[in-house]
Each structure stands twice: as structure tokens, then as C-alpha cells.
Image (cartoon, helix red, strand yellow):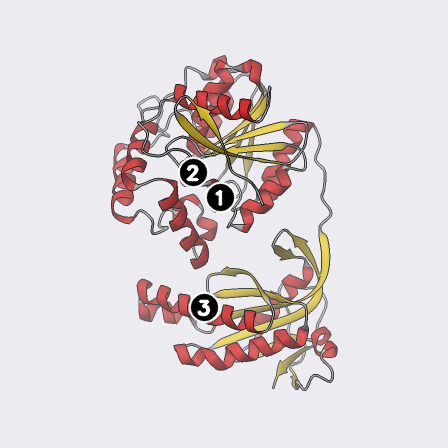
Amino acid sequence: MVTTKYAKSGNVHVAYQVLGEQQRDLVIVPGIFSHLELFWEDPGYTHWMQRLTTFARVIAFDKRGQGLSDRGVATPTLEERMDDVRAVMDAVGSERASIMGVSEGAALALLFAASHPERIGALILFGTCARWSWAPDYPSGLTPERVAATLNAIETRWGEGAMVERFAPSRKDDPAFRHWWGRLERMSASPADMMTLIRMVCEIDLRDVLPTIWVPTLVLHRRGELVVPLAGARYLAEHIPNAKLVELDGSDHWPWTEGAVELSEEIEEFLTGARHATEPDRVLATVLFVDIVGSTDHAARLGDRRWRDLLESYYSLVERQIVRFGGRKVGTAGDGVFASFDGPARAVRCAMSVRESAPGIGINVRAGLHTGECEVVGDNLGGIAVHIGARICEVATPDEILVSSTLRDLVAGSGLHFSPRGSPPLKGVPEERSLFAVA
């Protein structure tokens, strides 16, 4: 459990958390969405923060007016927010730290590094720019029409998770993540406060500050960014003395939803001069993949809203059966569900129960199962065994439950019956594998 504490900055209480026990401090200034405790409900955030603590003591906080810090305060200035960073650093006994500014939070990080170089050892900027709004001499900024559209979206759809399509497009087809994102919007700030913040951000122009920054600086940006064009990052790197630019693959504006391992490795190398590979824990597990047969046709026939309702019913049905048979849901993607079990027979019986129950909500499913050694990273599972399970599901026919020969051999004597299905090619799996259908 991570404890949330408060630092006093003037009359404002600023919420913060400290993770890890390394000698090197890393202060993270969040972007426009921020809620210290809600972040931990997303496994991706947990994994990313755990990775950062392997080389730094991480200090995270909610900016005033957002998340768990005092809300309902007057619109903050950058100077007041700098006071908040200093108050948090003083509260945790950090004399000197590296500071990472994410998205809108980078403006604060930039100004703090320029104003207080004695307290900043290095500056890291992710998914950001020196100026947010368009100008004749800054064509990569947001046009007035784009700003107006953003404000309208906040006014009419705030809390629905719609902004995930621009901030984390790699997760936009994950209903569970979209639901979580909607909560993050609501718990970050109210619609009125967020619109006020957007207007304030669009007035910020730090271009004249960039040449005054002399601390080592790393600029990180994903090439396919939809919120801040890559040109904004290149401008930063060109105008901050001796800054290093690293262009990453992907399109997410959020740090940990895509390519988090690569991102943390770049940060580690910049701060320490080296990268260290962490050896994941390994465990024998049975993986189960289930998805809806003909999901595209269902979505086209039902329309967006009714399709979302059907997906919610489907997820609820599958999760109930996973719990019933002693498994654990690992993740969802689109209409697919990924679960793990420590007993292969229970995993098969779970798949059978889902198959029997699915017609009750108007759908049919298919499933694939495999037992093998999996890599454990936080709450997630990875490795070739997971890959094989997913590919087995892909070759299953409607209402079919396919298992690998490894799993079939492990459930001998369980009363389960199988029929051979040959060795169909599994995408990305080099060797042939005999598959069996559950009777």
C-alpha cells in the first residue's frame, strides 16, 4: 500500500506519495488528468512506477486544484505551483532531485528547472511543448478551432472517458479502461475547473525560457502523438541547450499505457548512465482466452451504445465464471478476456460454463487454453505461453474450446473429454502444436 500524505504550501494542502528507497530522487509533475490513488487501479501505472523505483526514489503529487490536493482554489499561477513543488520536496527531505514533467505538467517542470537549478539535477520532458496554442511563428500549436472543440467536449462529455481516444488510443477499444478513464476525468477536476485550466494552459508560452535552462535535459515523445505533435518536442530539443531528444514508437500521450518499459529504460539510462534488465518472476499457469464470435457484425447491427451495453453484460458473465472456478482476470482488449488459473481442469470447466451461458445474452463465444511457464510482471502475465494461448483462441471455431496437448495431458483422469483437431498453424509460433477440442 502506498500512503498519501499532505504538504502545506501557503494555505493549500498538496497531496503526495513517495515510493522506493533509492538515493536518487525523481519528482513527477503530472499532466492535466491526475488522481494519486485512482492511478493505482490501472496495472500499467503500477508496473511503470515499480520499474522507476529500481533506480530512483519516486515522488508523485497532485497539483493544487486537482485530484487529492485542495480543490476549489483560485486558478493557480505557475509561480504558485512552483511553491507547491518546493513544499513537497521539503516535506520528503529532498534537497536536490531530477524532475519529470508530463504533458501540461512540463510547463511547471521547465520553469522550476530554470528558476531553481540548484535543486534540480536533471530535467525530463514527456509529451509536451513550449507553447500550446497556435501562433504565426509557432504553427504546430493548437488552433482556436481545436481548443474550442476540446472545451465543448469537456462541457458535453466530461466523465464518459471519450478523451481516451486522443490521450491513449492504444487502449480505446478496451471498455474496462475507458470506464476507468471516465472516473479519472471526474476525479481529476470538475468540468468547469478543467475548462478554466485548459484556457490557462493555452496562454502559456515558455519559448523565451528555454535558452536559460542549463540542467541536463531529456525530451521524450511518441512519433504518432495525437495531442502534441512531434514538432513540439523537436522545438524543445532545438532550443534547450544540450538537450537530448528521443523519439519513441507509438501514439499515446500517456506515459505508461504504451511502451512503458522502453520509456523507463530511456529515463534510467539518462539518469544513471546505464540500463539494467530486470529478470521477471516465472510461474506455471493455465491461460484462458475468450472472445465473442462475430463481434464486428454485432457492433454494426446494435450501434455503439447497445454494443457497449452488451459488452458490459458479457464481461460481467465471464468474470463471474472466472471467480466461480478460482481463476483471475488478467485483462481485457476489445471483446477478448484473458484469465489465468493454477489448475488446468478448472480453467477448462470455466470455459465450458462461459460457452453454455453466452447464448443467454445473445452471443456465442470461442476459447483457447494452454498451460506453460509465464512471466509475472506485477499483476500481468507474459511470455510465450500467453502468446500460444491467444493464438489457439484465434483458430477456434464458433462455440469451440481448443486446448493444447500440454493441457490435455495434465487433466488426465479429470473426466474431461477431447477430440483431436490436428496441428493448425499458429501465427508467430514456430513449432507445430497438436490441438484438441473440448467435447
Query: Which is more N-terminal, label 3 or label 1?
Result: 1
How far apart are labels 2 and 3 at the CA level?
30 Å
Residue 25 occupies which quadrant of the picture? top right
Report if residue 398 is visible in the image.
no
Residue drawn at (72%, 67%) of the image: 431
Amino acid at dot 1 = Glu
Report if residue 241 is visible in the image.
yes
Q: Crowding near pointer 3: few (<14 within 10 Å), some, many (20+)? A: few
Asked whether the residues under the numbered discs 2 and 1 touch, taking CB atoms below 8 Å apart as contact, a structural biologist would say yes
| Location of the C terminus (image quadrant) | bottom right
What count of labels does the image hold? 3
User: Residue 242: percent from the left, percent from the top?
Assistant: 57, 18
| Up-down relation of residue 225 to residue 284 (above or below) | above
Q: Crowding near pointer 1: few (<14 within 10 Å), some, many (20+)? A: some
Amino acid at dot 2 = Leu
Q: Nearer the viewer, mark 2 or mark 3?
A: 2
Residue drawn at (29%, 49%) of the image: 157
Residue 392 occupies which quadrant of the picture? bottom right
Asked whether the residues under the numbered discs 2 and 3 touch, taking CB atoms below 8 Å apart as contact, a structural biologist would say no
User: Residue 223: percent from the left, percent from the top?
Assistant: 49, 38
User: Residue 435: percent from the left, percent from the top?
Assistant: 67, 77
Query: Which is more N-terminal, label 1 or label 2?
Result: 1
Q: Secondary structure at mark 3?
A: helix
Amino acid at dot 3 = Ser
How far apart are labels 1 and 3 at the CA level?
25 Å
State the residue position of label 3. Answer: 316
Seen from the viewer's position, the closer of residues 240 and 317 is: 317
Seen from the viewer's position, the closer of residues 391 and 254 is: 254
Q: Is residue 406 left or right of residue 357?
A: right
State the residue position of label 1. Answer: 37
State the residue position of label 2. Answer: 68
Query: Which is more N-terminal, label 3 or label 2?
Result: 2
